[in-house]
Image (cartoon, rainbow, N blue to C red):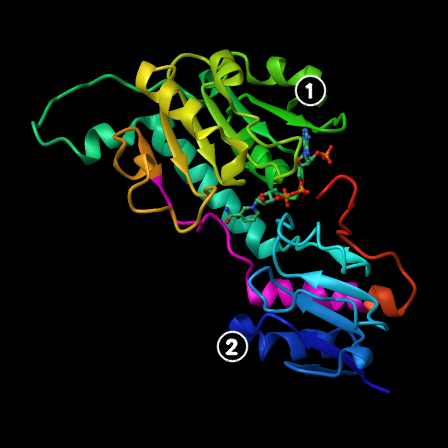
Amino acid sequence: MPLTILFAAPSLWDEYRDHLPAALREAGLEANVVLDADPARVDYVIYAPSAPLQDFTPFTRTKAVLSLWAGVERIVGNETLTQPLCRMVDPGLTEGMVEWVVGHSLRHHLGMDRHIVNPDHIWDPTCPPLARERPVTILGLGALGAAAAQALTALNFPVTGWSRTPKQIGGLRCHSGQDGLQAALTGAHIVITLLPRTPETENILNATSLGWLGRGAVILNPGRGALIDDKALLAALNTGQVGHATLDVFRTEPLPPDHPFWSHPKVTVTPHIAADTRAVTAARVVAENIRRSETGAPLLHLVDRARGY
Ligand code: NAP
């Protein structure tokens, strides 16, 4: 009997309509992927936070809900969702995030803006330091933070990482837990936030923690808007404690037109484009997880409801 897989993210169907059936076939699964079904007959739900589906109660035989998004803060608290919930760890998404992080890190490290926008034709021969002289701190050493750390380490940046649980990652100085945050941030020139949004990580960059950074440090936030206390960031930009912030994610998206980030000369806004899930690779991740579930193997990228990510 073929599996019934509900694709509950209709706005994304065009991207997945070819890749998903192909990936399921490659995984050796016989399945019907449908956009609508009797919930009581659905084996798996493929989900995105933008999906209209909010009540999972009638999905009585559903074995897992597979999110197409890496961040699950909009769904993790849904009390009707009692089925196992998997988040997306997609090689294509990771590749995109690494490119965004490396690109924006190099922009600031090399001081590219001075030469790209130079209306007064100023000849300033100051050479930027080498990457090895520019300490970078990455908050979050999960799928994305660890990959970004590796790429920056390969360019010789001295990278410090911070996570909830202790880690040992070759080439990195690692700190963990609330007690390790100050050590991770002290003296950093570039700070990259790749944490999930949870009650513990909200406003992790605030007036106190921004004060630990090296003066003029640059913040790159491709994680979630709520990781940063917006007012504290604006104050730190105005005093020069923070030299620039490149922000991809915001508490309200789209960023409201009158938000001070749009007009602040030391803020770059990118519209939540740091890393998209790529259908071709994500479809394979979904198919592999369904294959695992069907063969009794543990699901990959299972969300821990208590931790919130
Ligand atoms: P992940 O694999 O779950 O990694 C999360 C990392 O954060 C882990 O290292 C975890 O520590 C750490 N962490 C969580 N809570 C913490 C706490 N209280 N204190 C210290 N460290 C904590 O997630 P991911 O796949 O790397 O994704 C990270 C985030 O990126 C997502 O949640 C999402 O918000 C964001 N994102 C943004 C975009 C975009 O386009 N802008 C795209 C995709 C994802 P442990 O390792 O100890 O568990």
Q: Residue furthest left?
A: 120
x and y percentages locating residue 231 in the rendered image: 41, 26
Residue range corresponding to the magenta coloring: 269-290
Residue 307: within the magenta? no
Q: Is residue 85 left or right of residue 100?
A: right
Which image quadrant is residue 145 in?
A: top right
Q: Nearer the viewer, residue 13 or 229?
A: 229
Which image quadrant is residue 129 in?
A: top left
Location of mark 2 (residue):
14
Nearest-to-viewer mark from 1 and 2 = 1
What is the total number of numbered labels drawn onto the structure image? 2
Which residue shows up at 56% across the image and 74% down it? Answer: 10
Q: Quadrant of the C terminus?
A: top right
In which quadrant of this rendering is ligand 1 seen?
A: top right
The circle drawn on residue 260 is: none
Other residues around mark 2 within 10 Å, as few (<14) / some (14–19) / many (≥20): few
How far separated are the C-alphas under marks 1 and 2?
A: 43 Å
